Image: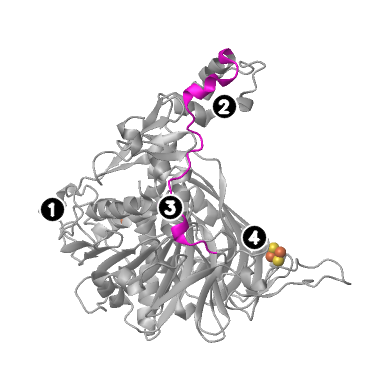
Amino acid sequence: MNESTREAIHLDDNRVLHADGRVSCVHCSAELGHRDTDYLAQALRRERAPEASGPNIRVKAEVFVDQPMVLRQALCPNAMWCCKPKSCRRAMRFFARPASRRRENELGSIAPSAHGYNDSLATGVNMNSPLPSSRRVWPNAGYSRVPYWLYTDQEIFEREMTRIFRGPSWSFVGFAAELPESGSFKTTSIGNRSVIICRNRDGELRGFVNRCAHRGVKFCRERLGQTSRFTCPYHQWTYDLNGALKGVPFQGGVKGQGGMASDFDPKQHGLQQLRIAEHHGVVFASFDEHTEDFLDYLGEANRYYFERVFDGRDIRILGYTRQLIPGNWKLMFENIKDPYHASLLHVFLVTFGLFRADQESQVKMDPTGRHGLLISRRGSQTASEHTKDIANLRTDFKLRDPRLLDPVKEFKDSATVVMQTLWPNLIIQQQSNTLAMRQIQPRSPQEFELSWTFFGYADDDEAMTLRRLRQANLMSASGLVSGDDSEIIKLAQDGLTAYPDDEALLAMGGHDTQDEDHMVTEAAIRAFYKHYRAVMEI
Amino acid sequence: MDVHGLRDQLEDLYARYVESLDDGPLDLWPEFFSVRCLYLILPRDNYERGLPLAVMRCESRDMLIDRVTAIRETMLYEQRYLRHHVTNIRVRAAAADALEVSANFSVIEVLPDDLPRVAMVGRYLDKLVASPHGGWWFAEKLCIYDSLLVANSIIYPV
Ligand code: FES
Ligand SMILES: [Fe+2]
């Protein structure tokens, strides 16, 4: 045994990790790779505990943290000379070629699976084949590059669901005003999982998953409603307003026969619980019991702007609409954290001076980079020396019916636009007098739902409500402004999907992630990815 | 009132209305409305819950014209072909100079690199008034689409 193996960690029976990062075969000491550059690096990463291994059965995080994952498919190539050397070599060559260049029956009587061969094994021995995602490495330019595989890869998506949406984060789920009475409930999604938020008999808000603890049925199909209990239609298991299992039909059997196993304890089979946080009538939920308190999570600067809109007044819901956008969910955050595009893509905004590169504005992030603020003040419909780059500026378009844009000042400061992005699923929109929550619900790497809740205040007069409804023309699926965004997200996804190994460039405003007093920057997107990479450990 | 004559008139009106959207020119579309009018595209859930939010809201012919100008001049979107299909036209109330009409609509959308798909289904709840030039104008047109979920964007009117 040489020097380095003494400090080596045995990953399992067949592989050792050396102090210098090399990984070798324990039998023949062939080098299998290096921790820092290879897929082995991924396998050595620390995994978080699954949030539950079954309904209400929580595994302590400590059980998993700091444990290297087992390398399942990294066999030593030498181990392949095990059986029939000739056929093995042929099989190796076969799998080293791309599928399009393999001939059917080429392997003849060899049954590759019997030897443990498969594609992922082959990629382990042929360094020229495309990298599977677990071997993907972030480009070496800090946060000013984003690799395109991030928008298409299924494994990345699963990891996002686990680490981001079910990790230590607070996801927006609705308004207290939507759940006015005991028994009021709402279904929504956190990441790709359906959840129920409900007010129990004591008037407290509760959250749990919309998945029956028996055999997985998504039992609640209503978006908003009122009930005294939840009953799964399949075998009629019944849960109370806290998600506790209260009834199992035929639990004691029928005529002395059958029935639930004697060790069945209904208390262990309630609906998996979420934590709930409410601040000034806005409701958030978290899958993770270790998530910090909501106000700490929000941070100082973001709290100011949050409370600017949610100052404690009662909210009036004006309506909902949902879009299914054929793009990766992160493109939505990038879009809202990107003031650079707003002056160029959104001709309507620019034309009417609602948002323009030469107006007084700020981009702010919280210290982690996860939340962001884009703040601006309205200007006028005139050209200036700074608007010459805006090829689309239309100074001649006058509204025939100006009631569409008749903004009035209603907040304590002079900002007329504040777009606040809260990790991991919320955009709080204040553009003039149109207020909305935009909730991001990823469905797959290529598709997310954007769910809009438009609101005003209970004390708005009729003129103000009408003003908000008119200005809503700027937003959502047919928005004079945000319609541009959903279309451009589709075009971005269409463009990047075929180029997983290329990368996006985020160098506007340099390479840093600090706050800025102008709009010609992509710093907020870089900050987002700084936090993203830390959470994802990629 | 001559029911069959009225039916013919309405069939013709809706056919021409749809033609202005599908084959253009889009400038013709506002002409189907009275000067003061209400045009809304809204999800069925909002309508049934009494929530006022619409994704497209125009309160006058001028606002309809502004929408057409925006579609032409300011909005970015992928080019598409649309086919609106209007069926089940039914007169729910009739007076000499005013009608209430309902109808089903479905919109097939064709994007350049995709197969045709159903972009939207729903129904119209319309109020018509007699136009001074003969024929009918829409004084109110509610386009209530089933469900809340929209296939990405609604660029053109329904
Ligand atoms: S699956 Fe819900 S009761 Fe059986
Ligand atoms: Fe935008």
- Residue B144 found in image quarter: bottom right
Which residue is under mark 2? A117
- Residue A42 found in image quarter: top left
Which residue is under mark 4? A216
Measure the alpha-carbon separation of dots 1 and 4: 58 Å
Q: Nearer the viewer, residue A497 or A298?
A: A298
Query: Label 1 amino acid?
Result: His
Q: Nearer the viewer, residue A498 or A246?
A: A246
Q: Earlier in the sequence, mark 2 or mark 4?
A: 2
Label 3 residue SS: helix
Mark closer to the observer (1, 4): 4
Give the percent coordinates (x, y) of residue B120. Answer: 55, 56
Give the percent coordinates (x, y) of residue A336. Answer: 31, 57
Label 2 residue SS: loop
Mark closer to the observer (1, 2): 2
Label 4 beta carbon less than 8 Å to ligand 1: yes
Which residue is under mark 1? A386
**As displayed, is residue A282 above or below residue A483?**
below
Which residue is under mark 3? A160
Mark closer to the observer (2, 4): 2
Q: Which residues are magenta?
A: A58-86
Measure the alpha-carbon separation of dots 2 and 4: 35 Å
Query: Label 3 amino acid?
Result: Glu
Q: Earlier in the sequence, mark 3 or mark 1?
A: 3
Tell which residue pokes out farthest to the front in this image.
A1
Label 4 residue SS: loop
Label 1 residue SS: helix
